Structure formats: structure tokens, C-alpha cells
Amino acid sequence: MEEKARIMDDKAIDRALTRISHEIIERNKGVEDLVLVGIRTRGVPLAKRMASKIKKIEGVDIPVGILDITLYRDDLSTLSEQPVVNKTEIDFEITGKKVVLVDDVIYTGRTARAALDALSDLGRARLIQLAVLIDRGHRELPIRPDYVGKNVPTSRDEIIKVKLEEVDGENSVVILKK
């Protein structure tokens, strides 16, 4: 695959996460009963970065959980005979909480649907919101993020690749051509 365009660098990602963090605080009228849950893999460092920004703004530590949705995917049989299942790490109660699911890219909406199913097995949240760094369109399910860092219209033969320091050793968002 060849790189078609670099659409976000380190500073652009940071600005988008700062804006989303402010929007989360505003929409929820503060941070009371607020928790962030990152969807593995790149949603986790994004959620942690947003929790850090919210702490700087509000002076409150926001709990951050890690959600593995592997077993909730509707395409599990097409991924692998033996899918790699990582651990969900949510060491706080979600019942009655305002949960913000965090992911790097929303495309068809199927990952978000799987995350909703996984969360419902853990408790009954008061409300669930979705924050994504990139919305590339092409939804197959009626799911829409509440917070978007950047809308990037793409064709189906393009791939958005988010790279984060914590996982990939750099911060960038690029469009790749198949």
C-alpha cells in the first residue's frame, strides 16, 4: 500500500483531542459520573490522553477502562480460526455512569456496535457516547459518533492508518491507497 496523504501530524492530533475533551465536558455539564473506555488498540491511548486533558481542565481524575471487543465482532469467523483475545480492563462500575467510548476511526459502525454489546454485558450505563479521532464515512449501521476529531471522506479502496506514539512510536494519520 502506498501513502496517498498525511492528514494529521502530532500537533493536529493533540488539538483535536483537546477540542473533544472540552466538548465532552460541555455536553455532560462537567465530569460527574463520567468515565472513558478505550476500544483496543488505539482507542486506549486516545482515552488516556483525553483523561489527562480533562484533568488539566477540571482538576479531576477520570477513570479510564480498556475494552476488548474481539468476541463481540460479527466478522469473527472471517478474521481467524483462533482470534487473539485481549483482556478487558474496567475496574470501576459502569452502571449509572456516563460512558464515553473512544476509538481511533469509525468506518462501518460495526466496531462501535460490538463495543456497545460488550459494555452492556458489564452493566447498565446511564448513557453512552462515542468519541473518535477520525470519521471516514461509509456507515453500514445507524451509528453516529458524538465527538469527532476530523471528518475525512474516503473511497472504499482507501485505508486510514492512525499511528500513536504509545503503540507505533509516532503520531500521525495517513490515507493509504490499496
Image: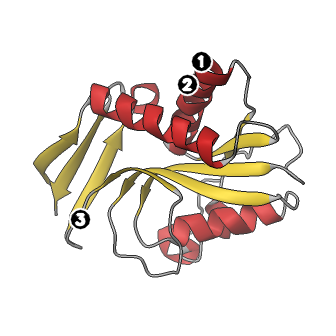
Q: Give the Cα distance between marks 1 and 3.
A: 32 Å
Q: Give the Cα distance between marks 2 and 1.
A: 5 Å
How many residues crowd around disc 2 within 10 Å: few (fewer than 14), some, or many (20 or more)? many
Q: Classify mark 3: helix, strand or loop.
A: loop
Q: Which residue is mark 2?
A: 53
Q: Nearer the viewer, residue 89 or 14?
A: 14
CB under 8 Å between discs 1 and 3: no
Q: Position of residue 113 (x, y in %)?
A: 61, 70
Q: Nearer the viewer, residue 32 or 151?
A: 32
Residue at point 85% right, 57% down? 122
Q: Is residue 115 left or right of residue 159?
A: right
Q: Is residue 35 left or right of residue 70?
A: right
| Foreground tag (2 vs 3) | 2
Q: Classify mark 2: helix, strand or loop.
A: helix
CB under 8 Å between discs 2 and 1: yes
Q: Taking 146 as reference, is 79 above or below it?
A: below
Q: Which residue is mark 1?
A: 56
Q: Taking 162 as reference, is 172 above or below it?
A: above
Q: Taking 1 as reference, is 30 above or below it?
A: above
How many residues crowd around disc 1 within 10 Å: few (fewer than 14), some, or many (20 or more)? few
Q: Taking 167 as reference, is 129 above or below it?
A: below
Q: Nearer the viewer, residue 14 or 42?
A: 14
How many residues crowd around disc 3 within 10 Å: few (fewer than 14), some, or many (20 or more)? few
Q: Position of residue 152 (x, y in %)?
A: 26, 58
Image quadrant containing the C terminus: bottom left
Q: Which residue is mark 3?
A: 153
| Foreground tag (1 vs 3) | 1
> Which amino acid, by three-letter code, is at mark 3?
Pro
Q: Give the Cα distance between marks 2 and 3.
A: 28 Å
> Which amino acid, by three-letter code, is at mark 2?
Lys
